[in-house]
Amino acid sequence: MIGVGLVGLGEIGQVHLSALRSSDHIQVSALCDLDEERLNGSRRGEWLTTHFDQILERPDVEALDICLPHSMHAPLAIRALESGRHVLLEKPMAMTVAECDQVIAAAAAADRVVGVSHNQLFYEPHQMLSKMISDGSIGDLRTIRARLAIGGRYGSWRSDPSQAGGGLLIDAGVHRIYMLQELGGPVVAVSANMDMPGMEESYSIILEFSCGAIGTIDATYHGPAGLFDDQIEVVGTKAILEVAGCEAQFEGFDDGPSLRQWSNGAWETLETSDSWDRSVVKSVQAFFEAVSRGVTPRVDGVTGRSTVAVIEAAYKSAREGIRVELPFA
């Protein structure tokens, strides 16, 4: 059993709280949020505070789960690690590769573990995609295409680049980056076009993988009102796979997960299940259970950094109009 303090009780923080409470390996010891009404409304006997430093004084808090605006990820993670706590961060790990490196260094110095919630890695249709690529079911991987279309820009802190670190790419777009890394492997080069790099509302990215495959991501906030459509398509020499609706299901735009395969001249719908919120629960629980067992989590600091590196490369490419090879300095 590991004692965990949750910092941030917004929409995603509430899903993390459900994940923590439903695990037999986790004791929710403390909750922290600036909104006292939300804090009190979330309480089920946990110790409460509106001050981050106070949660670090609690001996029953062995680890922190941080669900806050992106600008707060690195500074609060470093303080928590230096105090001897393990840390799980909501995506993205941080706003820049330099911040990621600082967090990783703090974890190493404190001999603590840092991880990132890349929840869509735990979504069953996506796991099936990954397995069918790795076991050769689709033949040689050739292309991966991800699409994200949202009917309206996110507000609140997400519309402030100083808090978000950018626009659509570093927010909802993060999921597309790490999923294509999972499916295609290491990214060796990035080319990107954006309407307003750093405040982007629409973008197109090309990823070149070390295996020789090509990935493309198209995303926009300017879809029809009410739209939330996300899809992944994988093309191999033996089959095509399509997944629709991880986040679309959560947003009420899609009825549920679907995975289709085209091979031998016909489409087939493969049996699958799962939901967006369940993928978050599995992601959160997997990190703290790995820490409890003393094993490396599925998404550690190095993995989280690699996703931020691709995002940073995409911003560089869009701003300078160049193809960016990875790693770059």
Image: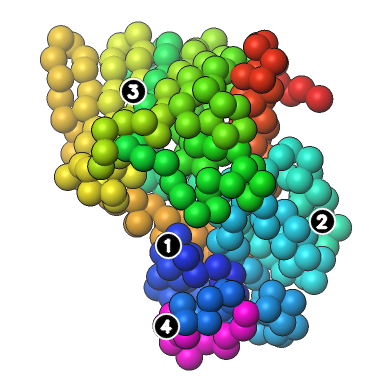
Circles 1 and 4, Cβ within 8 Å, touching? The answer is no
Q: Residues within 10 Å of mark 2 (few under 14, many from 20)?
A: many
Badge 1 amino acid: Glu
Circles 2 and 4, Cβ within 8 Å, touching? The answer is no
Tell which of 148 and 1 is nearer to you.
148
Picture colour scheme: rainbow
Task: Determine the CA span between mark 3 and mark 2.
Answer: 38 Å
Magenta residues (range): 40-50
Q: Quadrant of the C terminus?
A: top right
Rendering coords of residue 225 (x, y %): 26, 38
Badge 2 amino acid: Ala
Residue 233, disc: 3
Task: Determine the CA span between mark 4 and mark 3.
Answer: 41 Å
Badge 3 amino acid: Glu
Circles 3 and 2, Cβ within 8 Å, touching? The answer is no
User: Disc 3 or disc 1, which is closer to the eye?
Assistant: 1
Mark 4 lies on a secondary structure that is helix
